[in-house]
Image (cartoon, helix red, strand yellow):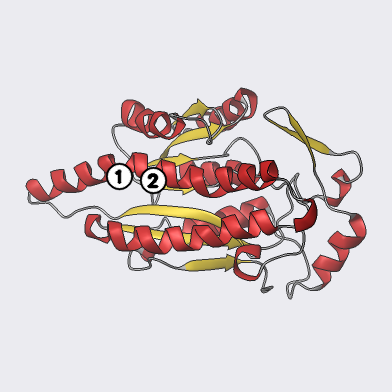
Amino acid sequence: MGTLDGKVAIVSGAGRGIGREIALKLAFEGASVVVNDLDAGPAEETVAAIEAAGGKAVECVGSVTEEGFAERFVQTAVDFFGGLDIIINNAGYTWDSVIQRMTDEQWDAILDVHLKAPFRILRAAQPVIAAQAKQAKGAGEPIPCRKVVNISSIVGTGGNAGQANYSAAKAGITGLTKTIAKEWGRYNVTVNTVAFGLIKTRLTDASASGDGTIDIEGRKLKAGADPQLFSAMVQTIPLGRAGTPCEAAGAVYLLCTPESNYVSGQTLICGGGFTI
């Protein structure tokens, strides 16, 4: 028996890295998971891994910034699994520059994926969440506690040179989280944020520096941290190391468990003791 048996979760950006580990963790604990990724291959691999372990999952491929994606994402959960209980807004990437070199395209792209997309997903989910709560109330049953976890970063709490777009988007997630926590409390939904510190993924891995790139909708963006900068960052972390995607997923899972049913509107920093 898992702690999330019978729950239905949607996880954006779940084909790789932290998102994949979140999807695997939720499925391991009994949730049926809708796995989103920009690319079909990684999404299908995550679904296959969940199914191989005895879980239930289905992919929903596409960019979270596409018109109509949010509605399709939510509807996939309803169509395949009959409802929606857990929303994880995780998809994202970075596109850095100091402000005098940052283009409008850079600004808009990062705000769109990290802030506008979660807003759209939550907006699309509201009718489903409200209907489920109304149905339970009408039947004289307790309204089950449902969960939203929005992914942020410590740069959203303290800023970071070269990341005005990313910092602004992640700070905005805090405001969105606190507002939806107030709006959806009547549906017995908790809404929280996990702000990650240095987590070792393909976007931060020092071994991927130099010519390492990622392809985001036709854009070739630099991936990986400078090894010296990465080492210097590690030295500032009280635990003395970067976190793993599995550990990052664990922090998200904490806010999906019944034990956190009275925690809402909060930001949990998962950074090994480091804060800005």
Q: Horizontal placement of 167 versus 130: left or right?
A: right
The crowd level at tag 2 (other Cα within 10 Å; few <14, some 14-19, many 20+) is many
Residue at (46, 54) in percent of width and height: 149
Residue at (52, 67) in percent of width and height: 268
Question: Which mark, residue 122?
Answer: 2
Instruction: Give the x, y percent position of residue 262.
Output: 33, 68
> Can the viewer see residue 28?
no
> On the image, numbered disc 1 is attached to which residue?
126
Location of residue 178 (image quadrant): bottom left
Contact (CB < 8 A) between labels 1 and 2? yes
Residue type indicated by callout 1: Gln
Which corner quadrant holds the C terminus? Answer: bottom right
Secondary structure under the numbered disc 1 in the rendered image: helix
Residue at (22, 59) in percent of width and height: 186
Residue at (73, 46) in percent of width and height: 103
Residue type indicated by callout 2: Leu
Instruction: Give the x, y percent position of residue 145.
Output: 29, 55
Work out how far the residue at label 1 is from the one at label 2, CA to CA, in angstroms: 6 Å
Secondary structure under the numbered disc 2 in the rendered image: helix
Instruction: Give the x, y percent position of residue 228.
Output: 92, 61
